[in-house]
Image (spheres, helix red, strand yellow):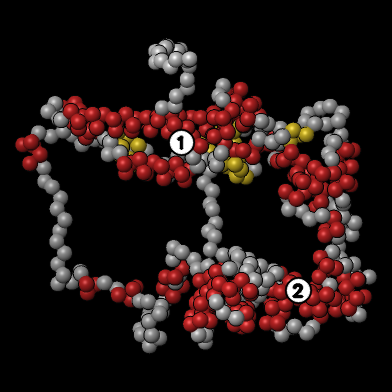
Amino acid sequence: MALELRQSLKLAQQLVMTPQLQQAIKLLQLSRLELVDTIQQEVEQNPVLEDDISTLNGEAVPPAPDLAPDQAEAVPTERTSEVNMESSSSINDIDWSDYANEYEPISSYRPRGDSEEMPSRLDILSEKPNLQAHLRWQIALADLTDDEKDIADNIIGNLNREGFLEAEVDEIAEQCHCDTDDVQYVLEVIQEMDPAGVAARNVQESLLLQLERLELSDNLPAEIIKEHLHLLETKNYVAIARAAHRSVDDVVAAVSVIVGLDPHPGWAYSDEEPHYITPDVTVQKVDGEYVILLNDDGLPKLKISSYYREILKKQANTPAATREYIQDKMRSAAWLIKSIQQRQRTIYRVMESILKFQYDFFENGVAHLKPLVLRDVAEDISMHESTISRVTSNKYVHTPQGTFELKYFFTSAIARTGGGDALSSESIRQRIRQIVQAENPDKPLSDKAIADIFAKDGIKLARRTVAKYREQLGILSSKFRKKPKLK
């Protein structure tokens, strides 16, 4: 078969996403903080964009009148007055006591008053010291050689966020090219540092180290942790007393000491910062009707610079490359402003549809949450499911029932055996929590018993489903919820 070149025409449809459309989709799925950062980056990169400061305290600020050149010269201009370093209102009037440092010598003069109640300058540091930094600070003050400090640094680097050592002594000795006895010695030095129980291999060793710090390593609490930890997990105090040949009262007193220990000593020095949520939407009830309010606080009000508009209108001698650059930036800025406005309108419409479907939730709480899927809202407002998914991601709403993520309102349905309205999985979880809170602590309900309670109300739940929902709520199984036996 001979090879040849041939031209042919083919007609086909293809979906092409323009950069502007990609930007609109990206803005739609951003969280509020990410949106603010994105807008700030666009303002920095696009000279045509600028913040709209034409409103001040809710009142419009009139634009400055256009003045002729001769009139402009007649208008007096404000000038910044020069600072006279020798005047009485300069350095001599500065209260230098406000700049006093807490770490100055005690003999230095510090006036007493309200300033002593002000926070330390260390309280406003941007970064909080973590567990590793806290231990390295103690290692620097310890009487160790340089080689031992290298071993200590290796041990500290192998601690997890809970303060437990995740590496074996042999592995650390191989990495540091030293003997295991040296590693064990440095490990014991670190275990004597603050916080108590740090650098342990497991929770049991950490609790024993803390008891040793309290000089209780030879008492009943230490014996319970060493020999009867499995009985302590099930709160079987009678079996512990029988095995330890002690009274139940002694066991209860020892358990109270154990409960006061910290099973995760490293958490006290965690450097994880809390994540604060700023709602994108607020739903309030006003005069018996719910009102949806978009939260625009903190979002820059963008506009296209009038300066560049004038360049395109009046300055005809502007180079073609410059005009093309400005026009491109103006198109990009206009599309960004339009995309942000479209994003806000879409969030409003989605929240309006959710309010219609979940009206009983806003009135009565989580127990009245109805099953809802993305398709229901998409069909209600004539949008695609993917758009609804992007809108509800990382968006929060403040309601009379609390602050929730928009995805919280979308739950699967649990059908009733005898017909009737289906229940949402979230309302089922809420009811499981209420059942557990009202149970008899002497005879806690098993997962099968909870499933039987739902079956009486016409709700068919498998035991595995109850166990899954219970674990999602952080509720222990019945054997761990049982009240301790004292007789």
Label 2 to label 1: alpha-carbon separation: 52 Å
Q: Is residue 240 left or right of residue 266?
A: right
User: Is residue 254 visible in this depiction of the protein?
Assistant: no
Comparing 441 with 317, the one in front is 317
Residue type indicated by callout 2: Ile
The residue under the point 90% across, 76% down is 243
Residue 362 vs residue 262, the one in the foreground = 262
Mark 2 neighbour class, 10 Å CA radius: few under 14, some 14 to 19, many 20 or more: some
Name the residue nearer the viewer: 88 or 417.
417
Residue 177 is tagged as none
Residue 117 horizontal/vertical position (percent): 46, 72
Q: Residue 292 in the image: state x and y as whole percent.
A: 54, 34
User: Residue lying furthest front in this view?
Assistant: 1
Residue at the disc numbered 2: 258
Q: Is residue 453 left or right of residue 313?
A: right
Element under disc 1? helix
Q: Choose the circle earlier in sequence order: 2 or 1.
A: 1
- Report the front residue among 286 and 298: 298
Who's the residue at 24% across and 32% down the image?
325
Mark 1 burial class by Cα count in 10 Å: few <14, some 14-19, many 20+:
many
Q: Relative to 130, does residue 348 appear above or below in the rendering?
A: above
